[in-house]
Amino acid sequence: MEESNHFLQLYDLPDARFYYRPHTYDRFMIEEVWLNDEYRLDNCTVMSNAGIIDVGAHIGSFSVRASKLFPDNFIWAFEPAIDNFNLLKNNLKLNNCANVQVYQKAVTDNKKKANLFINENHTGGHSLIPDFHDKKAIVEIDAISINTFVNEKAVDSIGYLKIDCEGSEYQILDSLSPAVWNKIHYLGVEFHPVAGYDAIASITAIQQRGFRLIRQKEGYIPGQYTAIFERNHA
């Protein structure tokens, strides 16, 4: 098993198990998805031919849950930070998530390389935004856009697009082509306070693209929101 620099503990849930790093935000983030159903996966109906994309997969909380709920769907998980990525792979293996493919890449608007700013106080706080949170190290990483990935994989339908990428969400959403927008059925985004962007305006813009807002939750810092959308059906 590949380990990060922390001693790992095992967290047992009724339907899953996770390796996590004690005294970090790992367990909190697992509980947000599994105990609080942060992304409302329990209430989603995803067609069996639709792919699921997890942007900012961290250690696998969302991907494992999606794999358990939608075993016939293919899931693509993106996590650029190496420590998180190793735990992500371990947790997918631990839970027999054979329908998840992982990529140690950042998702961006159109770049093939990016600088990842490492937050040493929060395992889920690494960001491509230079002035986002506290950070010390900078790591150059591979990157890909959703447009490119969807075209390369010939994805016909996106059952759920989940985005939690510490400030890059605005650029990612702005970069999506009309063709990709039309493929999305459910969209779950964690919006962060970033200079030059407004979460509420982005939420409104998504609704104007033909989506119904099914959940809007204020976060733990001012200007942070989690928003879940479902495409309106004619």
Image (cartoon, rainbow, N blue to C red):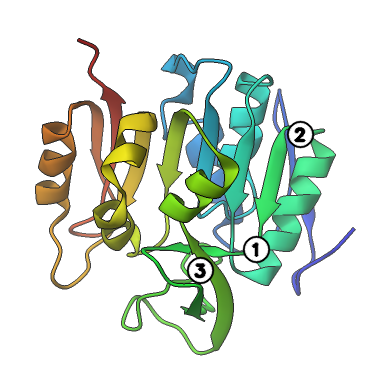
Measured Cα–Cα span from mark 3 to mark 1: 19 Å
The image quadrant where one finds the N terminus is bottom right
Q: Crowding near pointer 2: few (<14 within 10 Å), some, many (20+)?
A: some
**Camera-side residue: 225 or 89?**
89
Residue 11 position in % (x across, y down):
73, 42
Q: In the displayed structure, would residue 42 be above or below residue 105?
A: above
**Camera-side residue: 191 or 154?**
154
Q: Earlier in the sequence, mark 1 or mark 2?
A: 2
Q: Crowding near pointer 3: few (<14 within 10 Å), some, many (20+)?
A: some
Residue at coordinates 44% horizontally, 18% vertically from top-left? 44
State the residue position of label 1.
104
Measured Cα–Cα span from mark 2 to mark 3: 26 Å
Splitting the image into 4 quarters, where does residue 36 fall? Answer: top left
Q: Viewed as shown, does residue 71 lie left or right of 28? A: right
Q: In the displayed structure, would residue 78 be above or below residue 82?
A: above
The answer to whether residue 191 is seen in the rendering is no
Of the residues tagged 1 and 2, which is closer to the observer? 1
**Camera-side residue: 142 or 8?**
142
Q: Secondary structure at mark 2?
A: loop
State the residue position of label 3.
122
Q: Using the image, tell me which numbered label, if any, was put on residue 97.
A: 2
The image quadrant where one finds the C terminus is top left
Q: Secondary structure at mark 1?
A: loop
The answer to whether residue 131 is seen in the rendering is yes
Residue 213 position in % (x across, y down):
21, 28
Amino acid marked by disc 2:
Cys
Q: Using the image, tell me which numbered label, if any, was put on residue 138.
A: none
